Image: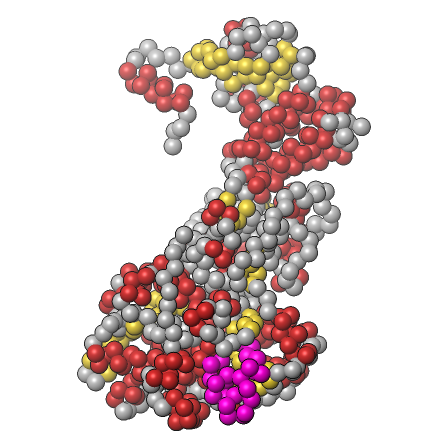
Amino acid sequence: MRIKIEEKEIETDGKKTILELCRENGFNIPTLCYQEGLKPKARCRICIVDMNGKLVTSCSTYPVDGCVIDIDSERVMKARRMNAELMMAEHEKICSIDGKAHDLCKILEEIGLTGIRFEPIRRYEQDLGSSVLRDDNKCINCGRCVDTCAEIQKIFAIDFASRGHNEHVAPYCDKSLGEVACIKCGQCIINCPVGAIFEREHLHEVIKVLKEHKKHIVVQTAPSIRATLGEEFGMEPGTLVTGKMVAALRKCGFDRVFDVDLGADMTIMEEASEFLKRVEKNGPFPMITTCCPGWILMMEYFYHNLIENNNMSTCMSPHEMLGMLVKNYYAQKVGIDKKNIVVVSIMPCTAKKFESTRPELHSAVDYVLTTRECAKLINYFKIDFRNLKDEDFDPALGISTGAGAIFGATGGVMEAALRTAYEFATGKGVTKLEFDQIRGIEGIKEGSIIINGKELRFAVAHGGANIRKLLENKDKYHFIEMMACPGGCIGGGGQPLHATREILKKRMDAIYQADSVLNLRKSHENPIVKKIYEDCLERPLSEKAEKWLHTHYVKRSEF
Amino acid sequence: MINNVETLANIPQAILFDDWDASLKLFCISGCVDKPGVYELPLGIKLSSIIEKAKPRNKPKALFFGCFGGCMPYKDVEFTQENICGEGCSHGCGSVIVVDSTKSIVDLTYQIAKFFTYESCGKCTPCREGTIRMLLLMRKIKKGEGTKKDLELLEELGEHIRETSLCGLGQSASNHILTALKHFRKEFEERIK
């Protein structure tokens, strides 16, 4: 069929919505509730267009044959303005996040809303009960968080409560997020267009520590931060900023800048050994990775049988391992009392904030900052990030391998573990270091490897919905990697807001690039890892390693 | 899905009886009448004969066609789509509220606005936020604190909700106010400052 958008004739098969057609043809239509890849809900009514004289929402309407579509007539703009005005009336004007990142602010500018004729009437208490916080006063009921939680993550922690004007987003019975089965993945944060959901900030505590500077302050950065931090300073997605990041953190006043990639290498040593032990004993299979605290929480809430059957690896997450090593191994080496060391982790993750408060971990990490907080910290100290000269991590615990670097993308943990496990078991290196089957952005990836004549099947899932799907037939596999956020850590809840699939791909390419340029690409080749085992841990899974680097899990009730 | 009781009740009649009269319709008559109730009457009869059944107390001033239908000044015309919808409202599903000069149109529209604010499910912006705004404006006008600007805003909001809401409820949520403003603007203007 032929349709006309703003005088431009377009041929279409009628299977695309007006919004999709407009975007393909370079017409910009503002949207709020629309999320790429999910079913349109048509809640916000900002994307309204005029089709044959009738106002329709472009996200949910299919064009009819021969129709004429007007996307910015005065009538359309007036309708958009009124809807924005109605939403803004309730939206608290003080925004917690940077104006530039604020979808609603951008839209207001686009459609030219100037004054608001209505007074706010609703007032809600803030929910400050966990590491993911909510302020309903800012909420505009677009439902993106609800859709994300239900459709992408399948956690169903929040939904709409009440009706009519009293409708608001809440966990069941208006409880706090800390009291319900929320996995703290933070996907709702990065999808919220108005900043009504946000992380518990440790920023000001860290600034205070840095300013007082009474202790030895160590910062460690996660593998994925180097591929995303640049975005917060207006750089292209997928720009690697490792050197600038280290330089900036040093300028902020941290005494040592370490690389969590080393922690990742340690994780691989432990995890690969654990896996081989299971191969020897023939079970229990599958073994499932435990680097992702969001996934751990999901398992603790919904999949108790994995704890009962000992399917979970017992390894701590990489930054907890490194924190432990900083406070025990490094402190001893440099002769500082571990009470006088502060460890700050920079993580792409809001669940890590929760993780560091787990009692069973006795966490060595004092503060966890997200990528966004890290950018705020750098801005706070007025550092010109873009023009910094590259610097290297501190060598004491800063040498890492490519295997640690790829932890930031989905499939990375698996790939790194396989590189090491294969060599441990066979004594030979893998012929090809890149496991292409488990790279890329598909939801569930699988493959197999033959170790000593035995075929071992492995699978990788990212995003809650894919995890649930994969767990339905988990018994097929020997080794499974789970990441709660779509794309792995590069799409984590602490990353720069509003990442599209394109951006995720670019970040992922950057991570793999970081791996490919390194000389050391297998965890067991890392000289520091070797030294740590020589100096104190003896060998992977030794008694001391078990005590320092392994943990256990608790069953949590869904209700 | 069919979920109207009247429709369901008619299905067996239509199947079982050859002489089923399709023009018979249930009318729900209420308001300033002595015998409010449900009456079965043929479509297309005069409005006066519909209202007579329920024994109106005084001469009617206006008719509201349910909460959804909007209102018109009382005229003795036939009850057909053209006659009623020509007045700027729809005839709804046969519910007629009789209003005589003892009652204020402003008070009644306020009550209906309350109904819509309660019934809005909250999914789409114009209905969720718009109905409460209309109610607040109506309350202001009812109390005598409204201004001319409020009337204009009320009209603008009404048009907006009708044009951009997601479902039938939202699209009819402002019918009563828009038609009342069209036909009985005087009563509103008397109430404002």
Instruction: Give the residue displayed 75% in from the left and 31% down from the top.
Output: B146
Residue at (36% x, 58% y) in the render: A302
Vertical side of B113 occupied by A405: above or below: below
Q: Residue furthest left?
A: A453
Pick the quarter of the image with the N terminus of chain B: top left
Q: Is residue A334 magenta?
A: yes
Q: Residue at left 64%, top 70%?
A: A204
Q: Nearer the viewer, residue A10 or A376?
A: A376
| A170 lies above or below B31 | below
**Residue A516 shown left or right of residue B148 in the figure:** left
Residues shaded magenta: A323-346
Q: Residue at x 68, y 25 (%)?
A: B181
The residue lying toward the viewer, choosing from B185 and A1, is B185
In this view of the protein, can residue A99 be seen by the observer? yes
Q: Please state if A92 lies on the left or on the right of A270 as rendered.
A: right
**In this picture, residue A326 sits left or right of residue A86:** left
Image mark count? 0
Main secondary structure along the magenta-highlighted residues: helix
A200 falls in the magenta region:
no
Residue A492 shows in this picture:
no
